[in-house]
């Protein structure tokens, strides 16, 4: 039974519509001296926490390192029943993706960790982390697309990254998902991925420009999806 749900989110823009919807309040300095920020409250009888990576030098902390720290701090201090990594991502026209489409992740891997050596080194570097066992049924019940999340430390995509994504069946490109999955695997915590598309990696458009243009639309779709997910999870209780 899900009584304690924790979202781990990189960017304020991704979380703010959701935070405002439920009126959850910030618990100031909860993770100090870490930059992570906590918002929490009760929704439909469940404790709902939203942990942001926080900011440094005036911008949101994105990427694997910040996501790992936020996830570890959240698990250790909040002990949630489920971690939900919610955020925006890139996807591929060739796989039928469109701007602001919402996906539920069915696996998570790193696409830019190239560690030469035997199969054990390769397996560890790529990750291929599992997701919460209820992810597939939730996607079916709510009519969301599903896809494999692939994670790297850069917004752009180099040819070697694309090769890794294609060879491993990747469909969604982000900067946090597999890092969250890595930490959850260490603690034995289930993780659900909710991703909304801001940019199409094979559209020919410049990535940051397309991301910036579509961020608001994708975040609104993300909020609507998360409302439905919270209702679904609370109904199952």
Image (tube, grey):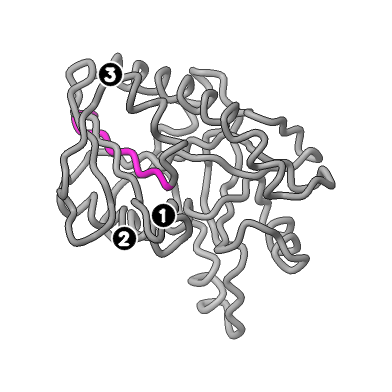
Vertical position of residue 96 compared to residue 153: above or below? above
- Image mark for residue 137: none
Front residue of 149/69: it is 69
User: Regarding mark 3 in the picture, which secondary structure is present there?
Assistant: helix
In the figure, residue 152 lies in which quadrant?
bottom right
How packed mark 1 is, by other alpha carbons closer than 10 Å (few <14, some 14-19, many 20 or more), is: few
Query: Is 31 left or right of 88, judged from the image as shown?
Result: left
Residue position for label 2: 69
Of labels 1 and 2, earlier in sequence is: 1
Magenta stretch, residue numbers? 1-10
What is the C-alpha distance between the residues marked 3 and 1? 36 Å
Residue position for label 3: 234
The residue shown at (58%, 54%) is 150
Of labels 3 and 1, earlier in sequence is: 1
Front residue of 197/214: it is 214
Disc 1 and disc 2 in contact, CB within 8 angstroms:
no
Residue 232: image location, x then y, percent: 37, 18
Residue position for label 1: 58
Which residue is outermost to the right? 204
Residue 228: image location, x then y, percent: 42, 18
Disc 2 and disc 3 in contact, CB within 8 angstroms:
no
The residue shown at (29%, 43%) is 51
Which residue is outermost to the bottom? 117
User: Regarding mark 2 in the picture, which secondary structure is present there?
Assistant: helix
How packed mark 3 is, by other alpha carbons closer than 10 Å (few <14, some 14-19, many 20 or more), is: some
Vertical position of residue 113 compared to residue 184: above or below? below
Which residue is outermost to the front? 58
Please state which of the two labelled residues, at mark 3 or mark 1, is closer to the viewer.
1
Of labels 2 and 3, earlier in sequence is: 2
Is 6 in the magenta? yes
User: Regarding mark 1 in the picture, which secondary structure is present there?
Assistant: loop
């Amino acid at each position: 039974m899900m009584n304690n749900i924790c979202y781990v989110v990189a960017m304020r823009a991704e979380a703010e519509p959701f935070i405002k919807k439920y009126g959850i309040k910030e618990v100031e300095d909860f993770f100090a001296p870490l930059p992570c920020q906590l918002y929490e409250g009760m929704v439909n009888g469940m404790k709902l926490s939203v942990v942001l990576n926080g900011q440094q030098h005036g911008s949101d902390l994105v990427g694997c390192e910040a996501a790992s720290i936020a996830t570890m701090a959240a698990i250790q201090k909040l002990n949630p029943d489920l971690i939900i990594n919610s955020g925006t991502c890139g996807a591929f026209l060739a796989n039928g993706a469109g701007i602001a489409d919402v996906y539920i992740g069915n696996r998570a891997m790193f696409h830019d960790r190239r560690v030469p050596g035997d199969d054990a080194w390769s397996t560890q570097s790529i990750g291929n982390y599992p997701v919460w066992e209820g992810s597939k049924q939730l996607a079916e019940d709510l009519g969301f697309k599903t896809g494999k999340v692939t994670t790297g430390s850069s917004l752009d995509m180099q040819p070697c990254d694309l090769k890794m994504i294609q060879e491993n069946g990747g469909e969604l490109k982000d900067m946090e998902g597999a890092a969250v999955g890595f930490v959850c695997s260490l603690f034995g915590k289930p993780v659900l991925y909710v991703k909304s598309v801001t940019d199409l990696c094979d559209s020919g458009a410049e990535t940051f420009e397309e991301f910036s243009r579509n961020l608001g639309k994708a975040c609104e779709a993300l909020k609507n999806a998360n409302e439905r997910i919270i209702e679904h999870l609370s109904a199952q209780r």
